[in-house]
Amino acid sequence: MIFLWAFIVGGLFCVIGQIMFDVFKLTPAHTLTTLVIIGALLDGFGLYEPLIDFAGAGATVPITSFGNSLVHGAMEEAGQHGLIGVLTGIFEVTSAGISAAIIFGVIGALVFKPKG
Amino acid sequence: MLYGRQTWLFENKPVILSTGVVGGPFEKDGNIPDAFDFLYDDMWLKQASFEKAQTMMLEDAGKYALTKAGIKKDQVNFFISGDLTNQITPTSFAAKTLEIPYIGIFSACATVTESLAMAAFYLNSQGAEYILSGTASHNAAAERQFRFPTEYGGQKPPTAQWTVTGAGCALLGKEGSGPVITSATIGKIVDMGITDPFNMGGAMAPAAADTILTHLKEREISADYYDLIITGDLGKIGHQASFELLQEANIQIDENRYVDCGMTIYAEDQPVLAGGSGPACAAVTTYGHFLKRLEKGEFKRILLVATGALHSPLSMNQKDSIPCIAHAVSIEAGGDNS
Amino acid sequence: MADKSKQGSNQDAQNYQSIQQKHEIKRPVFFNCLKAFVVGGLICLIGQLISTFYIRFFDFTEQTAGNPTVATLIFLTMLCTGFGFYDRIGQFAGAGTAVPVTGFGNAVISSAIEHKTEGYILGVGTNMLKLAGPVIVYGVFSAFVVGLVKTIITHWGGF
């Protein structure tokens, strides 16, 4: 079942993005930035984790989950070290996406040429 | 001779002695492959960057024009050219290879007519014997500078256009056999507040209409003086919008005699959205296709109105609108012109 | 004098913009959304398969499987971007490929590949995060603000 919900919830996040592209005429950068911030806000209200339990990759794969992970990192560190933890803990929980993108970006640049 | 405020009539009728036209793999599969003297199979041309490939295309187009006219590069007085890349460096490198005194210009997709107008003026006023006029563009070089990296998965709207990969050069002289340049109108900037860089045709249409109106008024002729009025790269949207603007201004143009290079160069099944664009669009289509038809006798008089969108990535980020311009040059079939 | 001409041109501009909009080919919003839904859903489905694979055959749990899943998806994005067909899928799917983490990966990797001609340090290194930068910058900043507000509220509100 989780496979079905992964498909549907993931698809719906993309539809929201597409509406931001086509109806609100936002650039990809504006759209994705907004979605990340929404992810952060949803986790602030404690709504994103239940979504992950329900939809699995349908919630962890869209870029919104990045905002969610960042807030998680901040909150976990704040739980241990107080307010300063909000500043220092942000990347604790998540670095997979950024690390992978940078590492594979360098490898990609070493191996590939743009096709034009 | 100056007519009105911004139109020149060339009594001495400078001649287009020859042209050189090259294109890339996409143009090979396009609507007018016969227009090209040479078509490359890939985007790199064995060069180290897309910008160097653009330089090479401009050099090659220049060499074809010179060879076909039997003129050596050290006989040419001036090379008037430009392109889209920052500070027009690819053109400057081509000028280095061609070793001709160089007037670098920037008019985006209107470069071909700005260059042609200036060349005709210098020749007409006995300021030169031979001038090489041309321009080039490269799809990947334009994309990476103005829009996104070429492998980026962004989605372009249906109003976007496809930058032509190619180069077109014309060698002009004071006399000889070939089509002649009879007049030119230099355009003013026209900016109707369009801010969408994915709708350049829509942004440029008013500039085209303004220059056509001015040209016809200052020359005191009507639109049917010309067998064909050719716009540079308005694409589907700009073509229709400019036609409506001209009708609103009571200019009677036959729809069949009002064409656009951006809509001519590619085939129906190619994914070019609203049509071709780029400085090379008007250059290769006019020099390789429309001029050939003029020489065959299909037309006697054509008006080429190339249009340029003079924005930059910086001006876009700073939320400026797109200032546009159109320059017009009239070309007629050469008679006995020696 | 200058103001008067500005007024005139504003009118002209508005007039023209309505002409232009008539001829503008409209974006096919419904079909774009449909394509985005299907492709985006498929990518998440593939992500779910990958997650399940990591949970089954490796030492990951439901909570921790997200990280290797994202890394794997970005690896696949590198292959699609490098072999030159991600951009075609992107033109078709729009937000369907941009919203999943594959879009983030593609933004970084395509920038890296493109700027190779300018060298690895100044070209690749400087430009790699050009498109993806805002996501990281504002993701971090919004997490900071949300974390700050939440911490202050729970501290003082005693929830």
Image (tube, rainbow, N blue to C red):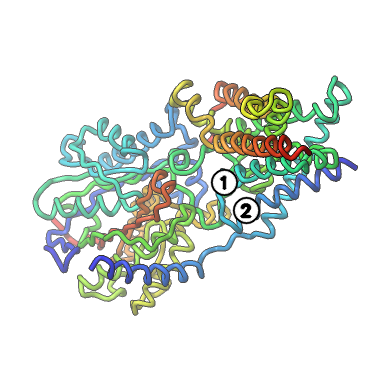
Q: Eyeballing the image, is B33 above or below B212?
A: above
Q: Is residue A54 left or right of residue B210?
A: right
Label 1 amino acid? His
| Tag 2–tag 1 contact (CB < 8 Å) | yes
Q: Could you tell which of marks 2 and 1 lies nearer the N-terminus?
A: 2
Q: Is residue C98 visible?
A: no
Seen from the viewer's position, the closer of residues B294 and B167 is B167
Residue matched to label 2: A20
Q: Chain of mark 2?
A: A
Q: Quadrant of the C terminus of chain B?
A: bottom left
Q: Residues within 10 Å of mark 1 (few under 14, many from 20)?
A: some
Q: Relative to B307, is B329 on the left or the right?
A: left
The residue drawn where x is 49% and y is 45% is B28
Amino acid at dot 2: Met
Estimate the x, y position of residue B234 in percent, counting from the top left. 42, 59
Q: Quadrant of residue A80?
A: top right
Horizontal arrangement in the rendering, residue B1 relative to residue C86 (left or right) = left
B268 or C47: nearer the viewer: C47
Q: Which mark is residue A30?
A: 1
* Residue C14, above or below C31: below
The quarter of the image holding the N terminus of chain B is bottom left
Tell me the SS state at disc 2. Answer: helix
Same subunit under labels 2 and 1?
yes
Q: CA distance from mark 2 to mark 1?
A: 9 Å
Residue A112 in the image, given as x and y percentages of width and height: 57, 26
Residue sitting at x 65%, y 47%: C95
Determine the image quadrant of residue B94.
top left
Mark drawn on residue B238 = none
Residue C18 visible in the picture: yes
- The local secondary structure at tag 1 comes to helix
